[in-house]
Amino acid sequence: MRTPLDLELVALTKRYGTTVAVDRVSHLFPGGRYVCLLGPSGCGKSSTLRMIAGHESVTDGAILLAGKDISRLPPAQRGTAMMFQNYALFPHLSVIDNVAFSLKMKGVDKPTRHKAAAEMLDLVDMGSMAARMPAQLSGGQQQRIALARALITKPQVLLLDEPLSALDPFLRIRMRAELKKLQRELGITFVHVTHGQDEALALADEVVVMNNAVIEQAGPARDVYNMPNTEFVARFMGGHNVLTVGGMKHALRADRTRLVQSGEGLPVSVASVEYQGAHVAVGLVGAPGGDLTALVPEAEFYASPLTLGDSAVAQWSPADLHPLTQ
Ligand code: ADP
């Protein structure tokens, strides 16, 4: 394991003509973390990642790795490596030659590069597939090869652009665990771009939420989920209601929103009932300030089930209200 190096973005900016894709973003990624860059489509995640990788030029600002400005270096000299969404494997090269490709470009002789590639294939549990062609592999296997190919350059920072989006949901969850394990074993920084909040919460030591070309909030996954700063973050992370109490907007977790038949609270009526297994999501209308959702534990819901059109009262503990700044 190598000493993890800090990655820092300093007023990093990307403009495409008049479009500002990344707007003076400054952020420190402490070394050795699993970071997820999370946000809706078009918010600037990929542009940020591609600038770190060197696949996109920096309009303004700097990218520092261990204090050294890498923002004008060619991709291969940065200490970063990128794994692409579509894996971008060479179809005419065997698995081992795909993995060894960057070493070949550096002029490393065949026995040495094949030995290094075989080690990388073992790392991703693909040692037995070295002679196969990419077309003979499943999506999950191709992804492991793409990972091995990125890691063979011994990067300090691995950049992953929507790495799980091409996989079916079952495989996605399995590969998620494997990525996390690999990051822990290697001890390097992973920066993983995703638009899925569940993926970010599952994987990240640190979640960085982007919106409109800037970082809206960053922090440990549980902090971002439990203490969203803004209405955007509360809504994007999901699982929250946004309420106006005392003239101020607050986030309230849907699983802390209780439903009773009468009493103090917000009078509402049931607009939808969705069984989700462990919980039942009850959609509520009629409250001033917008619709709400109560996530009711299954057993509790079915002890006195509600149906569409029923009246109820939504309640919460004041301690569960989290103030939003905007
Ligand atoms: P995300 O990864 O969050 O979906 P992107 O970084 O891909 O966001 O895009 C951010 C903004 O920059 C969007 O408005 C997008 O249309 C624009 N953009 C991205 N790539 C290019 C490009 N090569 N040329 C022009 N505009 C681009």
Image: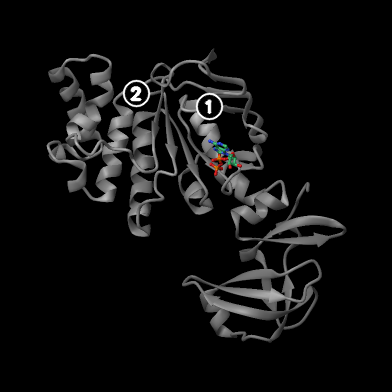
What residue sits 71% from the left and 70% below the top? Answer: 291
Q: Is residue 31 visible?
A: no
User: Of label 2 and label 1, which has the lower sequence position?
Assistant: 2
Percent position (x, y) of residue 191? 47, 34
Residue drawn where x is 66% and y is 53% of the image: 234
Horizontal relation, residue 279 to residue 228: left or right: left
Q: Position of residue 31 (x, y in %)?
A: 48, 25
Q: Which residue is mark 1?
A: 30
Q: Which mark is residue 1?
A: 2
Instruction: Look at the image and tell me whether residue 309 can be seen.
Output: yes
Give the number of marks.
Answer: 2
Kindly state the secondary structure of the residue where label 1 is placed.
loop
Pick the quarter of the image with the N terminus. Answer: top left
Gap in angstroms between the C-alphas marked 2 and 1:
16 Å
Q: Which image quadrant for residue 24?
A: top right
Where is residue 246, by image quadrant? bottom right
Task: Please state which of residues 49 and 93 is positioned toward the viewer in this rendering.
Answer: 93
